[in-house]
Amino acid sequence: MTNNKRPAWDEYFLKLAMLASERSTCPRMHCGCVFVKDRFVLATGYNGSLPGHPHCEDVGCLVVDNHCVRTNHAEINALTQAAVHGVNIKGATAYITNMSCTTCAKALIAAGIKRVVVFSDFHDTLATQFYTQSGVEIAKLDIPGRTINYDIEKYASARKTENSK
Ligand SMILES: [Zn+2]
Ligand SMILES: [Zn+2]
């Protein structure tokens, strides 16, 4: 089915967060995070193991107190990507598939994130309380459309490759 509705900005960046989450490697949670300022993508992250370490989906989760601790969460990985590349995220909006855990919320607040956009909740968290007390705006949206609408048959100037038939 083709849906030609042009996404609003919040929907567009939330969809990018969903795309990032496709790289997640922990079967207990797939989460994506995108930092955006002035409609410019500053950094992206998904929950995954440390570089060079084994993935949950290959060796199983490492569960402590009912949480898998093998992975860094999407927000932390987006923060570390920004840090590694020297990108200033102060004042940015965080588009996250799920409401942060308490630890990630505190990290984003300390890094100067001013707005958080999510479509799903995360249970047992003080994130909303911390965000609110720190003046961070929270927007909960409906889940964006889960399909990418690119109809290669329709666009006359798009050349098909062997793999895109
Ligand atoms: Zn895991
Ligand atoms: Zn977290």
Image (tube, rainbow, N blue to C red):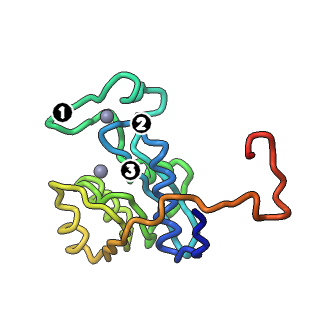
Which of 15 and 47 lies nearest the eye of the viewer?
A: 15
Q: Is the C-beta separation of discs 3 and 2 under 8 Å?
A: no
- Residue that badge 2 annotates: 25
- Numbered disc 1: secondary structure: strand
> In the rendering, at what x and y percent does residue 10 appear?
47, 73
- Mark 2 residue type: Thr
| Residue underneath mark 1 | 64
Under tag 3, what secondary structure?
loop
- Please report whichever mark, 3 or 2, sits nearer to the chain's N-terminal start: 2
Q: Mark 3 vs ligand 2: CB under 8 Å?
A: yes
- On the rendered structure, is 18 left or right of 71? right
Q: Mark 2 vs ligand 1: CB under 8 Å?
A: yes
Contact (Cβ within 8 Å) of mark 1 with mark 2: no
| Residue sitting at x 35%, y 65% | 119
Q: Which mark is residue 80?
A: none
Marks 3 and 2, how far apart in space?
A: 10 Å
Indicate if the residue with disc 1 has its beta carbon within 8 Å of ligand 1: no
Q: Is residue 60 above or below residue 132?
A: above
Q: CA distance from mark 1 to mark 2?
A: 17 Å
Which of the 4 image quadrants contains residue 24?
A: top left
